[in-house]
Amino acid sequence: MSERSHQQTGRTAAHDSAFLRACRREPVPHTPVWFMRQAGRSLPEYRKVREGIPMLESCMRPELVTEITLQPVRRHGVDAAIFFSDIVVPLKAIGVDLDIKPGVGPVVAEPIRTRADLERLRPLEPTDVPYVTEAIGMLTAELGATPLIGFAGAPFTLASYLIEGGPSRTYENTKAMMYGDPQLWVDLVDRLADITAAFLRVQIEAGASAVQLFDSWAGALAPADYRRHVMPASAKVFDAVAEYGVPRIHFGVGTGELLGLMGEAGADVVGVDWRVPLDEAVRRVGPGKALQGNLDPTVLFAPRQAVETKTDEVLAAAAGLEGHVFNLGHGVMPTTDPDALTRLVEYVHERTAR
Ligand code: CP3
């Protein structure tokens, strides 16, 4: 099959899946479930295939990416797969000197602080990430009617790693640039928007059925600053992929005060962490958008009965929504019992079967 017919086949087969129907706010046979970070960390079969292979290298091996992406689909029967990669992969692909340090996260050798530093960020071409196109081609062939979610980091979250040089709790250098040199800041996030849009386009062209933009750390911002300094760049990303008609999901942590703006940026589905119940989230987001979330990931450490009670609370709060994709409020924690995840998928499917 040609590459184009592969991607068509993948998306056509998945078109009527519960996940894509919920994203489009259409009736569903059951509430679809997937988990952020379902591919990786908590699974022993993941740790086994990753043994001795550094994180970024593993993202560049299509067979390995395919296997890791499929593992949670096989094991848990989730309603969607999420492509195994990382938000810093496109930055690495354009030559940014960065690494993923075990137990730390992304570390950038020379942080971006000046206009001269900015020149190191060149545009991303599809030929920079051939391994992404190859892996997604293999995946959509294997997945059949199960949709594949592509993803990227949003400009603010990527900028925070590039400016701080690694993970941060305060984002002091990031905010110093945002407030102190707004022109440099806007040029930086604009470049990142183009890189992110190009990375999402590669994934959609290769056959991804939906995309999620992770602005994981946007919750550090007040709404007025988000609207002024961040939202235009994220909106540029959403606009750039609108023509494909695939659902666009927008997620961040601690973003209760930003939910309306994150929808307004151009998302079809707004991801909600566990701090705001979904019936309140829908008031903040307004009509015309589906919601995704939002069981606290630490609930999975409690006994089965407690997990079911907390899940019932999420489902009750979601009862009035037009479209609901069940997920955790953030990623699966590494020490989560995988069987608790499998049971949770079954439980949501049973409780919501129509
Ligand atoms: O933790 C794992 O699942 C193992 C593989 C791994 C990933 N990223 C996969 C990933 C590792 C070691 C990383 C490094 C990394 N990158 C970290 C540290 C992770 C840790 O806890 O040790 C962090 C914080 C990053 C940066 C990053 N990557 C962010 C902020 C996000 C957005 C999602 C989030 O958690 O807020 C990512 C995306 C990401 N990294 C995904 C995967 C498989 C995709 C999203 C998903 O599966 O939900």
Image: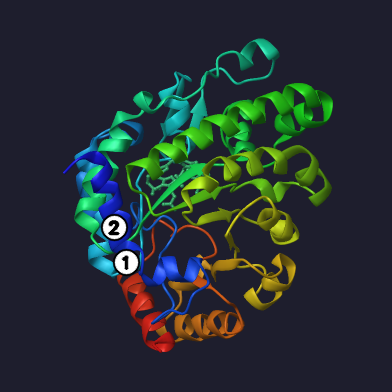
Query: Which secondary structure, mark 2?
Result: loop
Residue 273 screen position, x and y as percent: 60, 63
Between 125 and 50, the one lying in front of the other is 125
Residue 199 screen position, x and y as percent: 45, 35
Corner quadrant of residue 100? top left
Q: Which mark is residue 43?
A: 2
Q: Where ligand 1 lies, by quadrant?
A: top left
Rendered position, 300 above or below 46: below
Give the quadrant of the N terminus.
top left
Mark 1 Cα shell of 10 Å, populated few (<14), some (14-19), many (≥20): some
Say how the picture is coloured: rainbow
Rendered position, 215 above or below 32: above
Q: Residue furthest top?
A: 116
**Measuring 48% from the left and 71% from the top, which residue is drawn there?**
22
Q: Amino acid at mark 1?
A: Pro
Q: Residue furthest left?
A: 1
Q: Which mark is residue 25?
A: none
Rendered position, 347 above or below 39: below
Q: Amino acid at mark 2?
A: Leu
Residue that carries the numbered disc 1 in the rendered image: 338
Q: Are marks 2 and 1 in contact (CB under 8 Å)?
A: yes
Residue 97 screen position, x and y as percent: 46, 19
Side of 334 relative to 164 (left or right) = left
Q: How many marks?
A: 2
Residue at mark 2 to residue at mark 1: CA–CA distance: 6 Å
